[in-house]
Amino acid sequence: MLLVCTLEDVLCLSSRPETCPVRASANMGLESVTHVVSENNSGDEVLELLEKQNGICRTEFKAALVDITWFTESMGAGKPLQLENRHRLQVKRVAAAGTIAVPVSSHACQRRTTLNNRNRLFTDALKILAENAELSENEGRYLAFTRASSVLKSLPYNVTKMDDLKGIPNLGDHSRKVIEEILEGGTCNEVQNLIQNERYQTLMKFTSIFGVGVKTADKWFREGLRTLNELRASKIKFTKQQEAGLLYYEDLILPVTKVEADLIQQIIEEAVHRFLPSAVITLTGGFRRGKEYGHDVDFLITHREEGREEGLISKVISWMTAQGIILYDDTMDNSYHKWKNKESEIFDRFAKCFSIFKLQKMVHNLEPSGTCSHGSLATNETRGIRLAGHAGSSQHLTASAAKDKDWKAVRVDLVVVPFGQYAYALLGWTGSRLFERDLRRYAKHFGHMMLNSHSLFDNKQNKFLLAATEEEIFAHLGLDYIPPQERNA
Ligand code: UTP
Ligand code: MG
């Protein structure tokens, strides 16, 4: 049963039920509807029905979606009762701007965030402010802008006026001002100034080099360095990682396509199965969340018989290096047993390799200019890339800028996981980063549990909770399961 009513109706019905003209359809003006009452329907079903049958646009619909119990209780009380959470219908995808169906959670891990970002104009601006805060090592400010951007990404409607943000959490005064300015004039001055700012531009460029963090980039900037060529010509003693980062810079800043990620998976499967035939290789990170492009490719490797994976990473990397597949690697063994304080670290202790792969393009000369926008990649997507020949070594600091080269350098992370920790590793490596951060924060503050990519420790029960699947981990935490495609927070 679906009943569309105004508060007046409820008043009238509760006092004089025999004379009240209850409107059982939405033929009345949309403005006058205050409540939609339903029995045995979720909020999503109700909205769908209203959209289909009455042409109501959910983004403009402001009425409360309530369960029949609110209606009957109001009748019993002789007046419309104050709405309580238990009266509200569940709307998984938040109903609409201004509706009061289900509040938007302030935890990214309790929101469903797909790749369909309807508020890119605002989130792009907030991202730039977040980046600048990160470059200034202002963690609080970075988080504030990142959380504001994230909550906007989760909204199933375009924000067109400030009123659309009523009741939306994680939007501080500064973020609201940015949104307001964009709503009024299309841009935000602070963001426009930042884009032109020399420090911002230079630090963004330097930190996009593999192996260069904010502190190093800032130091180079303060020493007067501004361009990659100046870095390359300088006397700076680079780390091995930075050397590789500069050597393959022009390739590494190109987005990696899903087609490339799939091809890399085939290469890795071939290599891993030489040493451990039934090992399982899973594509994770952004690609598992449904992204078509990434800055790198992340894989988990495991084997059903725990222990069989030990020593695998070095064998695989040595073999691939000998084949010329690996241009750079930073390989480390599993050090979980040495981890004293198992909850406090951000990084995990799995055996892993941060590498740069050499992929040969099947179609020659895909990016004539050496750079490629997201747009042009869409057409390149169908073109294949296969395993390259021997990598060789180049002393030249711009190896990947060379015109006519038939290969592309790609960042690949390989993580070898004991089977018993696989579900935790999969959850931890699927991201997004904010989703993971909030999941851990939620576990700590609301569940009194410590979550990381190895395990979940319950402080109250004083024991580790086992999980074979991600669904079981969400259940341990008392959270609705959010599939990877909805973790793009
Ligand atoms: P990425 O940095 O690869 O991000 O980390 P991404 O979401 O795949 O995005 P792009 O497309 O590459 O830019 C993937 C996940 O792996 C975890 C991060 O928390 C992130 O959620 N991660 C990454 C680790 O746990 N440890 C690491 O050393 C790196
Ligand atoms: Mg990634």
Image (cartoon, grey):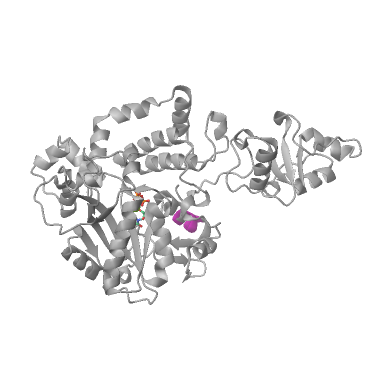
The image position of residue 102, as x and y in percent, is 62, 45
The image position of residue 461, as x and y in percent, is 51, 70
Which residue is rendered at x = 14% and y = 37% of the image? 223
Residue occupying the far right of the picture: 18
Q: Is residue 100 left or right of residue 191?
A: right
The image position of residue 317, as x and y in percent, is 22, 65
Residue nearest the viewer, comparing 59 with 179:
59
State whether residue 334 appears in this view: no
Q: Decide: is 365 above or below 192.
A: below
Which residue is rendered at x = 40% and y = 35% of the image? 124
Dominant secondary structure (helix, strand or loop) of the stretch shown in magenta: helix
Magenta stretch encompasses residue 444:
yes
Which residue is rendered at x = 32% and y = 26% of the image? 193
Provide the residue span drawn in magenta: 440-445
Which residue is rendered at x = 17% and y = 60% of the image? 324
State whether residue 248 appears in this view: yes
